[in-house]
Image (spheres, helix red, strand yellow):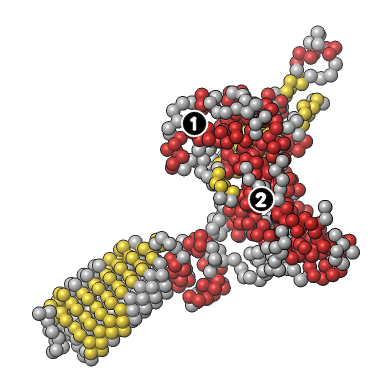
């Protein structure tokens, strides 16, 4: 079977040629520039069990793009894919979204059939799940997705629908009058959040050349066979992560999570107090532009590590390159920014003006990775030699205590104190 | 897998000894932050020491309104921003734009007071009229303005200034170098206490042209009003015609 990547590349060019999606090339991966919304959606289609949230103003081609990709990857018509999605509004119920009890089971003929029968909806049965306008579901109803994304199965009336390998997508608008805030736990289960911007001048001009209906043009897109779609996770898994990337991911998560004043130095343990509420006042690292801990309220969960690894590989596969540091630097802000809150006093100043959270997180990611690959080399080698028994723990602790770095002080030294 | 091998693979034998820099200073996000570090009346060197290294951030600092309190700081920042720009820097109408500018180009639609003060190089183009003290104490570079108010090019040491319209009072006061060309007219006391350099006026000039001047050259294509060259100690004045009580030895344009 030929590598489906060629077909995906053909799909990318077809989307542009048919004027179905023309986006700004706003994501630089090394020297390659691509459209973030399109490539994160494609990367998610190559993975399973991840969720990509497209976030942006109305009419930014979010839903249509996901449905077009679904049509191409599942080899179905656009109408069929559109019928599978669920759209948020306050009157949506579990019965309408996942399934309902089959009333025929209580008729005389079927009464002896045995176990309860549930009629699962197309959305529940599909392996391409789009939750459209997710923030139009009231907070309580968002919990349904929390369970689905967490357990990868749907249970209703004692019956279980195993979802198997599924691609999850969600779209949402910024806060409008009829939207609800998204729960933090749900946001953490979303692997990447990508801004969907309106087409720029040139893109608008090109889009105006489209004279046929989207659903007519959708039929002209290349389609993957079921075998090709099924083999994509395998192809992605063949891309191995460079050692630098593994190390940079680990350090990046520790940079965001460590806090000298939090229980177990873990910012995810904080509830009432946090950096934005004055927790860091007087701390050694406070206001140090090289330190990240005081600039972000929340720590990062292990899901972030998994998502970073998965999307690094998926991008490496799509772009046919190594899963190296430029890939990580490009994708990491999109994996992290929706899960954290930047310190207001930093975010509200230039160059962020209160709205540049993604740019702020990108700056922190860049700093963390650069520091790991440069300033932290010596301390990492000392720590690794001590863990491997090549260096006495006491000696390593003494050496590490001279490094003014949160990871050395709050992570490495306590670890070595335990093993000495 | 041994952790050492993992680290070796990550660093590929390139382990440097640099460490996390602490106490490097607070981040400069606003003019208030900068003023906390350098005060409200710093030198250019002090501002340069603390100014953000990121070009975008520098431009954003310049885009903030300084008010009167941070006008000097803003002036230095405009020069630093212009110096690191390859394209001309467009600025709004405020005081002290291009303060101690060394290179680069600044374009202003209108200009406040003290524009191009102490500049050493580069160019400033004012498309509208400038305020007082245009190019005061400038040492190099050039300023072109559509017009200006009083004290233009006061104590000028070098460079050039072109005023395409009229200049106010005291143009070229105390100059010791540089060249000034006014394509319109000047009000009174142009070239007062001038020691060197040149002043060219295509139109007319007001009273006391070259008052107490001791050097330099003044050429007026139009009329000079009364008391031209009064108590002049040196230098030369030439005008098409002179008003009453002009110095005795002043030549005409012939």
Q: Secondary structure at mark 2?
A: loop
> Is residue B105 visible in the rendered structure shown here?
yes
Mark closer to the observer (1, 2): 2
Q: Secondary structure at mark 1?
A: loop
Q: Which residue is mark 2?
A: A324
Q: Which residue is mark 1?
A: A18
Give above or below for A274 relative to A142: below
Q: Residue furthest right?
A: A420
Residue at screen point 18% across, 72% down: B203
Kindly report the distance in space between the C-alpha atoms of the residues bearing marks 1 and 2: 33 Å
Q: Quadrant of the N terminus of chain A?
A: top right
The answer to whether A21 appears left or right of A2 in the picture is left
* Labels in figure, total: 2
Image coordinates for residue B184, horizontal then vertical, percent: 21, 70
Give above or below for B82 relative to A166: below
The chain under label 1 reads A
The chain under label 2 reads A
Image coordinates for residue B69, horizontal then vertical, percent: 47, 71
Label drawn at residue A125: none
Q: Residue furthest front?
A: A2
Q: Earlier in the sequence, mark 1 or mark 2?
A: 1
Which quadrant would residue A99 be assigned to in this image?
top right
The answer to whether B141 appears left or right of A212 in the picture is left
């Amino acid at each position: 079977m030929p590598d489906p990547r060629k077909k995906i590349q053909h799909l990318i060019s077809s989307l542009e040629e048919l004027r179905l999606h023309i986006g700004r090339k706003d994501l630089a991966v090394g020297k390659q520039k691509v459209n973030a919304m399109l490539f994160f959606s494609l990367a998610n289609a190559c993975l399973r069990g991840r969720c990509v949230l497209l976030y942006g103003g109305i009419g930014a081609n979010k839903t249509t793009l996901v449905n077009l990709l679904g049509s191409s990857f599942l080899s179905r018509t656009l109408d069929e894919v559109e019928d599978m999605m669920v759209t948020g509004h306050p009157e949506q119920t579990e019965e309408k979204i996942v399934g309902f009890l089959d009333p025929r089971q209580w008729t005389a003929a079927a009464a002896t059939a045995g176990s309860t029968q549930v009629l699962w909806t197309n959305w529940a049965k599909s392996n391409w799940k789009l939750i459209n306008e997710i923030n139009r579901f009231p907070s309580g109803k968002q919990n349904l997705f929390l369970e689905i994304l967490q357990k990868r199965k749907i249970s209703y009336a004692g019956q279980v629908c195993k979802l198997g390998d599924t691609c999850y997508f969600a779209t949402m608008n910024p806060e409008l009058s009829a939207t609800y805030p998204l729960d933090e736990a749900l946001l953490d289960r979303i692997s990447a959040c990508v801004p969907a911007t309106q087409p720029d001048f040139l893109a608008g001009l090109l889009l105006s050349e489209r004279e046929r209906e989207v659903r007519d043009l959708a039929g002209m897109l290349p389609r993957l066979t079921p075998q090709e779609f099924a083999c994509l996770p395998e192809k992605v898994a063949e891309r191995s992560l460079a050692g630098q990337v593994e190390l940079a991911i680990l350090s990046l998560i520790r940079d965001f999570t460590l806090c000298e004043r939090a229980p177990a130095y873990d910012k995810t343990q904080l509830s009432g107090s946090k950096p934005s509420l004055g927790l860091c006042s007087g701390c050694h690292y406070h206001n140090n532009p090289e330190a990240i801990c005081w600039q972000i309220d929340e720590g990062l969960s292990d899901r972030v590590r998994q998502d970073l690894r998965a999307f690094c590989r998926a991008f490496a596969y799509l772009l046919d390159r190594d899963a190296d540091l430029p890939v990580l630097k490009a994708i990491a802000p999109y994996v992290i920014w929706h899960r954290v809150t930047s310190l207001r006093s930093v975010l509200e100043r230039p160059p962020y003006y209160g709205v540049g959270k993604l740019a702020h997180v990108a700056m922190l990611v860049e700093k963390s990775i650069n520091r790991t690959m440069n300033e932290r080399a010596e301390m990492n080698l000392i720590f690794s030699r001590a863990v491997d028994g090549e260096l006495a723990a006491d000696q390593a602790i003494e050496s590490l205590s001279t490094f003014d770095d949160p990871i050395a002080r709050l992570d490495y030294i306590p670890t070595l104190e335990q093993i000495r | 897998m041994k952790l050492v091998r993992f680290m070796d693979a990550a660093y590929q034998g390139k382990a440097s000894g640099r460490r996390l820099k602490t106490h490097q200073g607070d981040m400069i996000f606003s003019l208030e932050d900068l003023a906390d570090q350098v005060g409200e009346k710093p030198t250019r060197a002090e501002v340069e020491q603390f100014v953000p290294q990121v070009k975008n951030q520098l431009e954003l600092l310049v885009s903030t309104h300084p008010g009167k309190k941070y006008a000097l700081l803003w002036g230095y920042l405009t020069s630093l921003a212009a110096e690191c720009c390859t394209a001309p820097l467009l600025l709004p109408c405020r005081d002290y734009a291009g303060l101690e500018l060394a290179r680069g180009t600044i374009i202003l639609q209108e200009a406040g007071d003290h524009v191009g003060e102490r500049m050493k190089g580069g160019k400033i183009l004012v498309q509208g009229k400038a305020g007082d003290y245009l190019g005061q104490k400038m040492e190099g570079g050039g300023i072109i303005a559509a017009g200006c108010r009083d004290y233009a090019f006061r104590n000028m040491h070098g460079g050039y200034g072109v005023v395409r319209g009229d200049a106010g009072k005291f143009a070229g006061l105390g100059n010791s170098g540089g060249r000034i060309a006014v394509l319109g007219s000047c009000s009174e006391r142009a070239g007062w206490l001038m020691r060197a350099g040149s002043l060219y006026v295509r139109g007319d000039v007001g009273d006391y042209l070259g008052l107490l001047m001791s050097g330099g050259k003044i050429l007026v294509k139009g009329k000079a009003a009364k008391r031209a060259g009064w108590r002049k100690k040196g230098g030369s004045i030439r005008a098409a015609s002179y008003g009453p009580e002009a110095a005795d030895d002043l030549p005409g344009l012939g």
